[in-house]
Image (cartoon, rainbow, N blue to C red):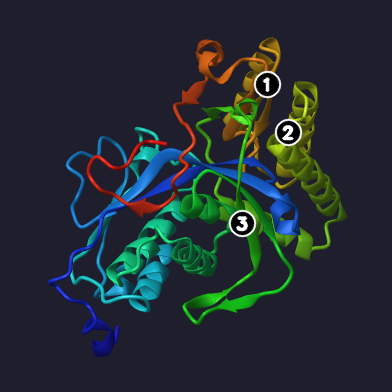
């Protein structure tokens, strides 16, 4: 690291406290890479950044990150984030801490809730705050999104939909556009995108089940890219069907006039196409598939339907029970618990990434 870069680090400056939400993929997995519409939702499980080490980790994950010697940082995402942060603001000389324990299980296993995207949102927002730019202004939030997405892409991130959820909050309709562009000289080029907040009817809010077999998004995309480069026509066919089913489901979830029957049929269709694609890629076997099977069986008894969420074939499962009012869904969660499934306690986070101030950060 150059002396000039190190000279920008000032010991008298403190890292701001930032909170960034995780996400669930409601619809459009894999298809979003084809330019199809996806729907993601920020949730009230967060990554927190500060200059203070958490008092209790309790099996979660906390990462102290030094900024003076980034070549000593093992995580490629964090190295890129520090580089981008340096281009925005004068950084404190002390390490910052990233506490992501809410996005991990008690035994330290990833829950598939977008931890890397939340880290990107938190660190880049921290840099903007150090530069005197708060994310309260919509224009600043959009710049944070572009820079965080560029950094995430440079380190091997996926479509960017999870970054959009972490930065914007709420439910986000997301779609990739055609050509690569540079973003204001602040980060490397990223593929242009459409990201806008969406209103979801209460019936579109699912229960979230964790299957104890997380699948790496990078690994899934790497397998997909390898299959396509090899000219695997079967994978292309599965991908096209997955993209179409995902887009139909995304639009249905956002449509207050859609019927419960239509929603459940599209959840089933999306589940089937996703499962076929992930199995063709060699994903979704073992406990993930077992979780999906069990969740689907319970959902049908409750008059609902279930689908995988994210890169795997059942590592994270969404259960939709639109006939049961949102405030009465504890009975559905209890039925899933009795079947041996782990239901995550999550709700929508409407706020997105923000500076964390004592007493001013509600969970949703």
Q: Which residue is mark 2?
A: 271
Q: Along the line of sight, which residue is nearer the eye, 313 or 98?
A: 98
Q: State the SS at label 1.
A: helix
Within-10-Å neighbours for mark 3: few <14, some 14–19, many 20+: many
Asked whether residue 98 appears in the rendered view, the answer is no
Q: State the SS at label 3.
A: strand
Q: Do residues under tags 1 and 2 come within 8 Å of each other at their CB atoms?
A: yes
Which mark lies nearer to you, 3 or 1? 3
Q: Along the line of sight, which residue is nearer the eye, 246 or 168?
A: 168
Q: CA distance from mark 2 to mark 3?
A: 24 Å
Residue 98 horizontal side relative to residue 121, left or right: left
Measuring from the top left, give residue 71's x and y in whole percent. 33, 74
Residue 198 horizontal side relative to residue 129, left or right: right
Q: Do residues under tags 2 and 3 come within 8 Å of each other at their CB atoms?
A: no
Q: Residue at x 21, y 77 (%)?
A: 9
Measuring from the top left, give residue 232's x and y in whole percent. 83, 57
Measuring from the top left, give residue 352's x and y in whole percent. 44, 49
Question: Mark 1 vs mark 2: which is more N-terminal?
Answer: 2
Measuring from the top left, give residue 79's x and y in whole percent. 38, 69
Q: Which residue is mark 3?
A: 195
Q: CA distance from mark 1 to mark 2?
A: 10 Å
Which quadrant: the C terminus? top left
Q: Along the line of sight, which residue is nearer the eye, 343 or 89?
A: 89
Q: Which residue is mark 1?
A: 296
Q: Along the line of sight, which residue is nearer the eye, 132 or 216?
A: 132
Q: CA distance from mark 3 to mark 1?
A: 30 Å
Q: Do residues under tags 3 and 1 come within 8 Å of each other at their CB atoms?
A: no
């Amino acid at each position: 690291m150059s002396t000039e870069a190190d000279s920008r680090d000032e010991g008298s400056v403190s890292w701001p406290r930032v909170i960034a939400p995780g996400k669930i993929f409601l619809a459009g997995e894999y298809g979003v890479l084809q330019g199809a519409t996806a729907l993601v939702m920020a949730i009230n499980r967060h990554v927190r950044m500060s200059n203070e080490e958490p008092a209790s980790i309790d099996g979660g994950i906390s990462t102290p990150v030094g900024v003076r010697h980034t070549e000593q940082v093992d995580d490629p995402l964090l190295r890129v984030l520090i580089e981008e942060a340096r281009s925005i603001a004068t950084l404190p000389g002390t390490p910052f801490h990233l506490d992501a324990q809410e996005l991990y299980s008690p035994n330290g296993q990833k829950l598939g809730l977008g931890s890397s995207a939340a880290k990107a949102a938190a660190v880049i927002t921290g840099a903007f705050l150090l530069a005197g730019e708060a994310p309260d202004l919509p224009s600043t939030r959009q710049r944070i999104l572009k820079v965080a997405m560029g950094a995430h892409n440079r380190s091997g991130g996926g479509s960017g939909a999870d970054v959009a959820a972490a930065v914007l909050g709420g439910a986000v309709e997301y779609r990739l556009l055609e050509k690569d562009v540079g973003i204001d000289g602040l980060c490397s080029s990223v593929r242009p995108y459409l990201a806008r907040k969406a209103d979801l009817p209460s019936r579109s809010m699912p229960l979230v089940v964790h299957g104890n077999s997380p699948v790496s998004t990078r690994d899934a995309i790497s397998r997909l890219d390898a299959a396509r480069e090899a000219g695997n026509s079967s994978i292309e066919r599965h991908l096209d069907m997955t993209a179409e089913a995902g887009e139909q489901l995304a639009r249905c979830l956002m449509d207050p006039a859609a019927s419960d029957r239509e929603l459940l049929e599209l959840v089933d269709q999306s589940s089937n196409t996703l499962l076929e694609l992930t199995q063709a890629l060699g994903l979704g076997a073992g406990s993930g598939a077992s979780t999906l099977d069990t969740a689907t069986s319970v959902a049908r008894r409750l008059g609902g339907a279930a689908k995988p969420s994210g890169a795997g074939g059942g590592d994270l499962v969404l259960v939709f029970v639109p006939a049961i009012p949102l405030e009465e869904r504890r009975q559905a969660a209890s039925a899933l618990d009795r079947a041996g499934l782990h239901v995550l306690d999550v709700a929508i986070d409407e706020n997105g990434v923000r500076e964390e101030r004592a007493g001013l950060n509600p969970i949703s």
